Image (cartoon, grey):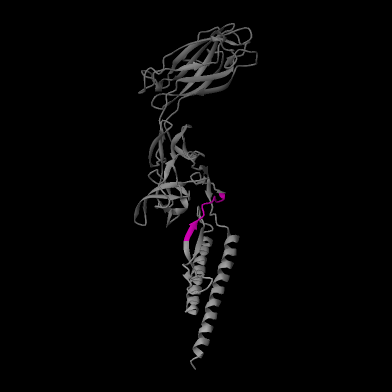
Amino acid sequence: MSLLTSLSTATSGLQANSLELTVIGDNIANANTIGFKQGRAAFEDALAQQLIGLAGGGQLGLGTRLQAIQRLITQGAMSQTSNATDLAIQGSGYFLLKGNHSGLQGSFYTRDGQFTVNKDGYLVNLEGLRVQGYQATNNVVQGTLGDLQVGTASASAKATATVSIKGNLAADTAVSAVAFNPADPINTSSAKPTTVEVYDSLGQAHSVAVYYQKTAAGSWDFHAITDGGGITGSTAGTPVEIATGTLTFDAQGNLVTSTQTNNFNPVGAINPQALTFNFGDPTGTGGTGSLGITQLGGSQSATTFTGQDGSGYGSLSSVQINDKGEVLGAFSNGSTRILGQVAVANFEAPDKLERLGGNLAIESTGSGQPTVGEPATGGRGSIVTGALEQSNVDLANEFVRMIAAQRGFQANSKTIQTADGLLSELMQLKR
């Protein structure tokens, strides 16, 4: 009876070491699989047989069996890529995907962050499953979880409200002897003009030239001129004055006062459009008078900075994702804004997730339910953009385990050979 038992005990050892080799082979095969977590076969001894009649008592072991294949959830190395939509999680958590995988419709979890934007503008994995996250409205991330759409965004036009100008008007410029003439601004002004693009409420650009005329010592007028083709009631080719005002300076060249009136009525857009020309911080209103336009000595007047806060319509040029998982869109009109935020799911027992293939997993009774939220909150890991998490398989360790499994298999086969030899001897007793 004990010889036959030894055969079955050794057979269990063969089966156990075969399973160990299968797990090792799976690890090695996935050594270069993005986000893969290595497995480890855990074995236990089989139920022992109670020996009857022995003075000291005791139990006879009946071999081994597979207890579980444990998933080792350790951090894999980060590999930098040149793709802005490649993502990795530093720390705990999984990307949440939705769609159909191998006929199964539902939610899936993965550490594989090889994402791209599909033809409909959704952020998806390479299989086409949609990445889940939070959309943003007016640059604010909303709280509703859903398919993350980022590729169809556009930037609305914004009317210019303020034009900022910095520079210097030469103090030794002669006082103008003629009145300013919008039809002949070059010959009736005292300094080179400042040119700036101004946008109306439709996003249409209007090229505006600001001319300066010295009217007295320390006193200047400015005149903002644009082509009449874009102004209500005017004709193309006719210069139209849309704003005018005065600038005064003290003996140190600092701006003291700045006054202005405007009459900007762009065709088809909001009329009139409020437009403020910011020439700095006049001392008359408590400023320094030196942060914008000044009147100091120099061979000629010069503009050092122009800016305005409007923009035309913009189409999406590119997307970037930061460590908070926020998707930032850059638009052709130079503006940027938050389009959404990638969600991260965390589990109490992530090693109990059920593998589905395709670098995907689903929740199980052992893993518990996911807690989904923003990255880097509630114990969830942060996002590493432009990077992918490599497999956590250590090939050197797998080879050592392979040798141990091979030797274990060989040793159990020797047990079978030995028991077989003894059974053969027993059979010879009959002859």
Where 337 sits versus 171, above or below?
A: below
Q: Residue furthest front?
A: 55
Residue 72 is covered by the magenta coloring: yes
Quarter assignment of residue 316? top left
Where 277 sits versus 334, above or below?
A: above
Image coordinates of residue 187 in percent, x first then y, are 53, 14
Where 247 sits versus 139, above or below?
A: above
Residue 252 is covered by the magenta coloring: no
Q: Nearer the viewer, residue 48 or 252?
A: 48
Q: Nearer the viewer, residue 45 or 266?
A: 45
Q: Residue furthest top?
A: 216
Image coordinates of residue 416 in percent, x first then y, are 52, 78
Residue occupying the point 42% across, 42% down: 372
Whether residue 26 appears in this view of the structure is no
Image coordinates of residue 272 in percent, x first then y, are 38, 17
Q: Tag count in the figure?
A: 0
Q: Which span is picked out in magenta?
A: 68-78
Q: Residue furthest bottom?
A: 431
Image coordinates of residue 390 in percent, x first then y, are 54, 52
Apparent side of residue 113 relative to residue 191 in the rendered image (left or right) = left
Where 81 sits versus 45, above or below?
A: above
Whether residue 68 appears in this view of the structure is yes
Q: Nearer the viewer, residue 416 or 265?
A: 416
